[in-house]
Amino acid sequence: MISLDKLKKGERAVIKDLITEGIPLTLLEMGCLPGNEVTILGLASRKGPIYLKIDESHMSIDFVTASQVLVELKK
């Protein structure tokens, strides 16, 4: 498993675990849950926001939050 912030644009993964202490409730409500698929749509430079799609929801999350989402790459 790797953290979501390590993925590159276009990569897809399945959420496996969350370090829940830092995950905002709204992110959970939008589908950031174990078992859901995530696709990286865009990355800002210098540890900026990450634009992603979880199932059919599009959202941006900050780099620190992304580092607390553990995923497994899809091949």
Image: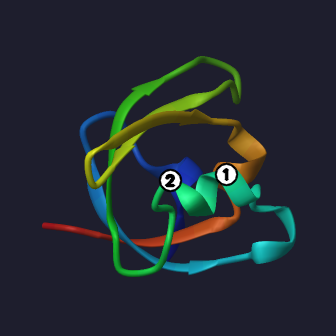
Q: Classify residue 69 by image quadrant.
A: bottom right
- SS of the residue at dot 2? loop
Q: Assign a secondary structure to mark 1.
A: helix
Above or below residue 60? Residue 66 is below
17 or 73: nearer the viewer: 17
The disc at residue 30 is: 2
Q: Label 1: which residue?
A: 26
Which corner quadrant of the image does residue 71 belong to?
bottom left
Q: Position of residue 72 (x, y in %)?
A: 37, 75
**Amino acid bearing label 1:** Thr
Residue 57 disc label = none
User: In percent of the image, x 62 and y 53: which residue is there?
Assistant: 27
The three-letter code of the residue at mark 2 reads: Met
Q: Residue at x 75, y 61 (%)?
A: 23
Tag 1–tag 2 contact (CB < 8 Å): yes
Please give left or right for residue 58 compared with residue 10 in the image.
right
Q: Is residue 5 above or below residue 15?
A: above
* Residue at the (20%, 68%) spot, across then down: 74
Vertical relation: 66 (above or below) 19: above
Question: In the displayed structure, does residue 75 sit left or right of residue 62?
Answer: left
Few, some or many residues within 10 Å of mark 2 (<14, 14–19, 20+): some
